[in-house]
Amino acid sequence: MEFTTLMLTSLLLLLLHQQHKFVRAMNDLGEYITTDIQISWLPNLDELMKGYARNFRPGIGGPPLNVALAIEVASIDHISEANMEYTMTVFLRQIWRDDRLSYNHTNKTLGLDSRFVDKLWLPDTYIVNAKSAWFHDVTVENKLIRLQPDGVILYSIRITSTVACDMDLTKYPMDEQECMLDLESYGYSAEDIVYEWSDIQDQIHGLDEIQLAQFTITHYYFVTEMNFKSAGQFPRLSLRFRLRRNRGVYIIQSYMPSILLVAMSWVSFWISQSAVPARVSLGITTVLTMTTLMISARKSLPRASAIKALDVYFWICYVFVFAALIEYAFAHFNADYMRKQRAKIKTHKTGGQEFKTTGKHAIVLFSLSAAGVNHELLMSNRLHRANRVLRGDEVENGKARAHTRGTALNKKLTLKSIFKPIDSDTIDIYARAVFPAAFAAVNVIYWVAYTM
């Protein structure tokens, strides 16, 4: 009985303790729910906007409005040499003062919804050299409005724009380009708006951290200038940055294959002159491969009249490859000529031996007809004395013709001595040294000219 009473007492005490905790928690929640949140420091936006004319700039009729700009680069997505343009995503921040929106309820800055932008006057800033541009609206419009008690407004937007960039591709791919982003007022002249870079814009945030595939950003700076038009003077702010092209990919994809093709064409100098199919096929293959490499490299470039450094190098390699093919044609011609000359000399030697054999038979026949020859000599002497006068002129003419033939023969011998055929093997030996030396010298001149 005592044990049962003790158990009931313990259960009752436990229930009372849990009830006390529950009541205390409910009282705390009730105090939180019934507490009134004090937001009396917030200004009444409806009163601020009462009588506000968004079609007129702040301080109209007075001095020009100062608008400070600041840029933060989010990314540079694409740089195209063919279209001479680049795509950039930036955060454009504009700061100006509108006394009509000042308030004295508090000294705190208000962060307003992006839909409030449609009720305000905004500077008509645009990108001068933009080909196309668009705002971002995921998940909401990427716009920011902050209002300070003294009427200073911070307006920030996220823009992606494709911007034109004039490029000088004369030294491509050892070139450096300077691109710019020009900001200007579209409708307000310098009498109404004056643009200036913000005090916090001592550097471009994000630009130093951008990694590009083909370029490296080496330098950037700000420019403030005045653009003169027929409608007046318009203030312009420019961000200019220099891009240096990374040459590694071009050395691997263009220069090294070209050098290897030229070196491959030199292999024919070590192939025998008699292996005509091997040397001709090697020369034609290297010429056609070089042509294909030139065409494929130009597909990504604009069809400009300027001669690029890569084009110059391709043509240098093309000339050396073609010269190697011409060298074999010249060596083969000399080898064929020397072979014909040796065959002709051999034929003359064989003819001399036949002449000696025939001469012996002629002596025997001559001795048998000696009497007949003497009779013929007597008759010929009589005719010779009768026609001696008539033949005097013919003798003189014969001497002149003989002199002319002798002069021509001397000239022919002189030209042959000058243009004496060279042995084909000697030509190949010279080519093995001359071609590599000439190619190395041209490469030194090329790289010094385009990299200095």
Image: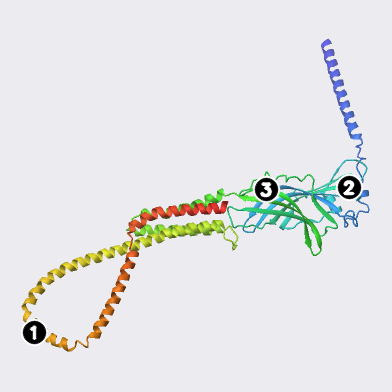
Q: Earlier in the sequence, mark 1 or mark 3?
A: 3
**Percent x, y of residue 5:** 85, 13
- Name the residue carrying label 2: 151
Q: In this picture, is 17 found above or below 38?
A: above
| Direction from residue 94 to residue 371 in the image, left or right | left
Q: Amino acid at mark 1?
A: His
| Direction from residue 180 to residue 230 in the image, left or right | right
Residue in the foreground of this view, choosing between 199 and 365: 365
Kindly report the distance in space between the C-alpha atoms of the residues bearing marks 1 and 3: 114 Å
- Name the residue carrying label 3: 219
Disc 3 + disc 2, Cβ < 8 Å: no
Residue in the foreground of this view, choosing between 270 and 253: 270
Mark 2, other Cα within 10 Å: few <14 / some 14–19 / many ≥20: some
Tell me which corner region of the image, top left, top right, bottom left or bottom right, holds residue 420: bottom left
Q: Earlier in the sequence, mark 3 or mark 2?
A: 2
Q: Earlier in the sequence, mark 1 or mark 2?
A: 2
Q: In this picture, is 20 found above or below 438?
A: above
